[in-house]
Amino acid sequence: MQANGAGQGQDSELSCLNNSTQNGESSSAGGAHTNVNGLSTTNNGNSVSNNIGIPAPAASNNTVSSDANSVKKKKRLSQSEEDVIRLIGQHLHDLGLNQTVDLLMQESGCRLEHPSATMFRNHVVEGEWDKAESDLNELKALMHSPSAIVRMKFLLLQQKYLEYLEDAKILEALQVLRAELTPLKYNTERIHILSGYLMCSHAEDLRAKAEWEGKGTASRTKLLDKLQTYLPPSVMLPPRRLQTLLRQAVELQRERCLYHNTKLDSGMDSVSLLLDHACSRKQFPCYTQQILTEHCNEVWFCKFSNDGTKLATGSKDTTVIVWHVNTESHQLKLMKTLEGHAYGVSYLAWSPDDTYLIACGPDDCSELWLWNVQTGELRTKMSQSHEDSLTSVAWNPDGKRFVTGGQRGQFYQCDLDGNLLDSWEGVRVQCLWCLGDTRTVLASDTHQRIRGYNFEDLTDRNIVQEDHPIMSFTVSKNGRLALLNVATQGVHLWDLHDRVLVRKYQGVTQGFYTIHSCFGGHNEDFIASGSEDHKVYIWHRRSELPIAELTGHTRTVNCVSWNPVVPGLLASASDDGTVRIWGPAPFLDVQDAEGLNGTDLFDWSSYF
């Protein structure tokens, strides 16, 4: 090969050139026999070759060592092979390895981009707008949508206009606006906005109002990226195309990784492209890190605070225990014990700012308690009637109101002092949730459905209809998905917007006990639920089969809660009187780690 750069843009074809080569021959840089672009000829022992892959003419009819039949034609590159070469060439060009690009294009017979596109690129980068506009006329014939020329011309002239303004060339800018941009009759609304920039007092003001980087390489490169979207990739490759493809591949592997539970880093520096992405199960919260035994009876509920620094647990022993969570060591320490819940505590709800905690009891309980967690003081003990059954509660996102209700037909909206603001008669509530719009309250009832109630205009509508009783439900952070624990059926995932059943998760044992499941992990990609078979089940949201079964409890697991800030921390509450804290495996040998509780069900490498 010769580093003369002659391979790029030698003819008008967009694909690789037809080259000929003698297959299987090695090349030598300094001997009597040379091979250029895979082709070699010999004239009486003297090597003769050219650099575009065409056999050199013979010196005489009798002195050529082999005839034309002995020259094997180089295999024509397939379209995918051409694409790969161009992608590599673009990446090398972006790295500044231009000589290497020239050699690659020369030897392969490919061209990185059309000559007209190269000129166009150079003229845009150099700010030669008249020449760039002239280049568009040559590119027009190569485009699938000639009308896109108008949009491209508009973008060019807009940059030209802004640069004139920044240079304080007001008359020139005005001429571009009136004589070049306006006659295009395109995006008149944008032209009105551009005309307003004439009033900018200085360059900084212009850049701020136009949200523009200013005259120079940054804004022109950004302009090129926009212009390239209108050009076919055979003419000019989209910017940084190889990096885009590699990033997509890495992201797809991460999305398919059933144990991936960390933030998806969009950068490429944190990953190796030499190996497929695969998270170890040992990084997943499948292992008991701590067992909390301070309750002296069945533990019915557990819930992490919204900031992840506290865990509240409610028990049949009439107490609520608030635990401090060390987000670094993942260890929990008893913080406060809240007493006096005569019927036990079966449901807990943190206020949006974690200042308050509401505790509800079982079916026979007509009271609820609103605690100030910081001071440990009881702010409100609410009871509208001794006939009530207040078993569920949900905070309004504004933190100033909450809704509560039960199966005896009570459904109230109250303020922080327990004053009744609104009520809905005749609704037998099993579970409640307030949506982010601050108006809609979701309530599961005894008719095996979830309905949406609007306390402002007193309207209601059916959203979910099941065939069996809905024992509990929870909603994803974005308000789109609902996770239901359905009697005798298990865990169901519903899309609240489309009102369709998305998935039925397998494995869990669900009778008529109230079991609370949860979303969790990074981006809420996972689902966890307790079970009457004493286990905690974990699924990836898109897979109906469990990816882990966590063993250790000895009676029904009533509730699970995933820490919203620490994706590797999970809590479970059980009738065995304990709360288990689950986390990644400790630093043990492989053999020891494999022997810890928690069952990996099968090899997922062939799942997809």
Image (spheres, rainbow, N blue to C red):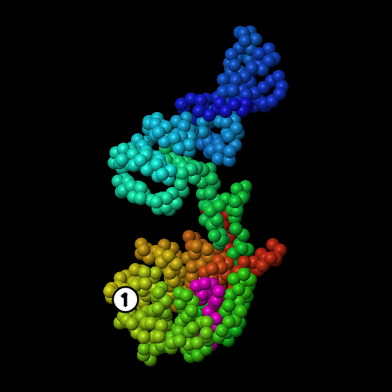
Quadrant of the image occupied by residue 149: top left
| Image location (x, y in percent) of residue 221 | 48, 42
Where is the N terminus found, in terms of image quarters? top right
At 36% across and 80% down in the image, what residue appears?
Answer: 413
- Residue 33 relative to residue 441: left or right: right
465 and 434: which is toward the camera? 434
At 32% across and 74% down in the image, what residue appears?
Answer: 453
Q: Residues within 10 Å of mark 1 (few under 14, many from 20)?
A: some
| Image location (x, y in percent) of residue 329 | 63, 71
Q: Magenta includes 500? A: no
Q: Magenta includes 309? A: yes
Instruction: Give, as a three-letter code, the residue at label 1.
Output: Phe
Q: Is residue 600 depicted above or below 190 in this figure?
A: below
At 45% across and 74% down in the image, what residue appears?
Answer: 352
- Residue 157 relative to residue 99: left or right: left
Q: Is residue 146 depicted above or below 406 in this figure?
A: above
Quadrant of the image occupied by residue 390: bottom left
At 34% across and 68% down in the image, what residue appears?
Answer: 463
Helix, strand or loop for disc 1: loop
Q: Is residue 374 depicted above or below 463 in this figure?
A: below
- Residue 2 relative to residue 443: left or right: right
179 and 249: which is toward the camera? 179
Q: Which residues are magenta?
A: 303-322
- Is residue 169 in view from this perspective? yes
203 and 465: which is toward the camera? 203
| Image location (x, y in percent) of residue 306 | 50, 72
Residue under numbered circle 1: 455
50 and 42: which is toward the camera? 50
